[in-house]
Amino acid sequence: MITKNEEAAWHEMIPGISVSTLVYGENTLMARFRLEERSFLPLHAHPHEQTGYLVSGRMTMTIDGAEHHFGPGDSWNIAPGVEHGAVIHETCLAIEVFCPVRQDYMPYLAVK
């Protein structure tokens, strides 16, 4: 599967947090996230392993009760079932890969 940038539309999930599902395969799904300054991602957990890379911006993530400060070039891995959330200090662009495929993100895949 190949997705060109102009085909990947943004979808606001909650105020200030938008997702664009890019590609998926048999085992993984890759999405990009735009997180607006002063927004927050509530604490949540899901059955997917989540590996992320912060392209730009600054945020504080709470992962399993511990706070971690992230800036451009930082990355993370969150095990399945671990509670996590974020406070966005500066508008962020993040790329994340989920395993197994997040079926709930499939509607955000825009392929022409």
Image: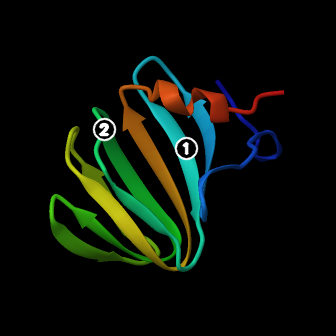
In front of the other: label 2 or label 1?
2
The relative height of residue 58 versus residue 18 in the rendered view (above or below) is below
| Quadrant where the image shows the C terminus | top right
Question: In the image shown, does 47 or 100 lie closer to the viewer?
Answer: 47
Q: Is residue 91 left or right of residue 3?
A: left
Give how far across and how far down residue 66 sits, in percent: 16, 69
Query: Where 82 falls versus 59 (above or below)?
Result: above
Q: Amino acid at mark 1?
A: Ala
Name the quadrant of the N terminus: top right
Q: Quadrant of residue 75?
A: bottom left
Q: Position of residue 40 (x, y in %)?
A: 46, 68
Residue 108 lies, with reference to residue 37, above or below; the image says above
Which residue is farthest top?
26
Residue at (23% x, 51% y) in the render: 83
Q: What's under tag 2, amino acid-wise?
A: His
The circle on residue 31 is 1
Left or right placement of residue 52 versus residue 76 in this view: right
Q: Which mark identifies residue 46?
A: 2
Which residue is farthest bottom? 89
Q: Residue at x 23, y 38 (%)?
A: 80
Among the 4 quarters of the image, the one containing residue 60: bottom left
Describe the element under mark 2 as helix, strand or loop. loop
Question: What residue do we see at 50% from left, 22% from top?
Answer: 25
**Spatial CA span between label 2 and label 1:** 16 Å
Image position of 30 (left or right of 70): right
Mark number for residue 77?
none
Helix, strand or loop status at disc 1: strand
